[in-house]
Image (cartoon, rainbow, N blue to C red):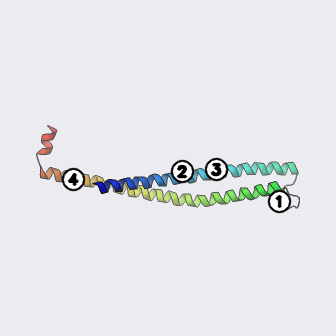
């Protein structure tokens, strides 16, 4: 009995941990995307201010060049996190399946225990209900 409870607690913990990881990754991806959009605006403003939109030009703004590099790094990081997110979602689905199996096993075992108790004392269940 105690081992079943421990297994169920472990499976529930694994599901919750996987769910937290998925939410954390989704939040990070959203934040990186927001930061990249903000950098796009800053780059556009800097290019408008300086009148130079060609990153290969020798007089291109150093700030705009640095902002472009940072934006590109954020986009790459978001892409990497996207693959981690897919893995985390897969792990979450697996953990949920394992939990469902453990819960099904527990309910079957409880049903078997009830049948065994009824077989040992056939009239006890009816008397308790009266």
In primary-sequence order, the first of circles 3 and 4 is 3
Please say whether residue 105 is visible from this viewpoint: no
**Image spot of residue 100 (x, y percent):** 37, 54
Circle 4 SS class: helix
Farthest residue, direction top: 130
At numbered mark 2, what does the secondary structure look like: helix, strand or loop? Answer: helix
Mark 3 vs mark 1: in front = 3
What is the C-alpha distance between the residues marked 3 and 1? 26 Å
Q: How many marks?
A: 4
Give whichever of discs 4 and 1 has the lower sequence position.
1
Q: Report which residue position mark 1 lands on.
A: 55
Task: Determine contact: label 2, label 4, CB under 8 Å.
Answer: no
Judging by the rendered image, the residue that carries numbered circle 4 is 113
Side (left or right) of 2 relative to 13: left
**At 50% from the left edge and 51% from the top edge, which residue is drawn?**
20
Decide which of tag 3 and tag 1 comes sooner along the chain: 3
Secondary structure beneath dot 1 equals loop
Q: Position of residue 64 (x, y in %)?
A: 80, 54
Disc number lying in front (1 or 2): 2
> Residue 117 vs residue 11: left or right?
left
Q: Is 25 placed left or right of 46 in the picture?
A: left
Q: Residue 27 appears at what percent x and percent y? A: 59, 50
Disc 1: CA contacts within 10 A as few (<14), some (14-19) or many (>=20) = some
Q: Which residue carries the number 2 mark?
A: 23
Q: Earlier in the sequence, mark 1 or mark 2?
A: 2
Residue at 71% across, 59% down: 72
Neighbour class for label 4 at 10 Å: few (<14), some, many (≥20)? few
Using the numbered discs, state the Cα–Cα distance from disc 1 to disc 2 in whole angstroms: 37 Å
Disc 3 target residue: 31
């Amino acid at each position: 009995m105690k081992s079943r409870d421990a297994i169920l607690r472990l499976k529930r913990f694994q599901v919750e941990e996987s769910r937290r990881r998925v939410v954390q990754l989704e939040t990070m991806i959203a934040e990186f995307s927001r930061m990249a959009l903000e950098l796009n605006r800053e780059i556009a403003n800097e290019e408008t201010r300086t009148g130079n939109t060609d990153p290969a030009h020798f007089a291109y703004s150093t700030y705009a060049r640095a902002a472009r590099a940072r934006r590109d790094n954020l986009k790459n990081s978001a892409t990497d996190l996207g693959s981690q997110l897919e893995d985390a979602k897969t792990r979450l689905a697996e953990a949920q399946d394992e939990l469902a199996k453990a819960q099904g096993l527990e309910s079957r075992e409880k049903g078997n225990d009830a049948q065994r108790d009824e077989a040992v004392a056939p009239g006890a269940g009816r008397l308790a209900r009266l």
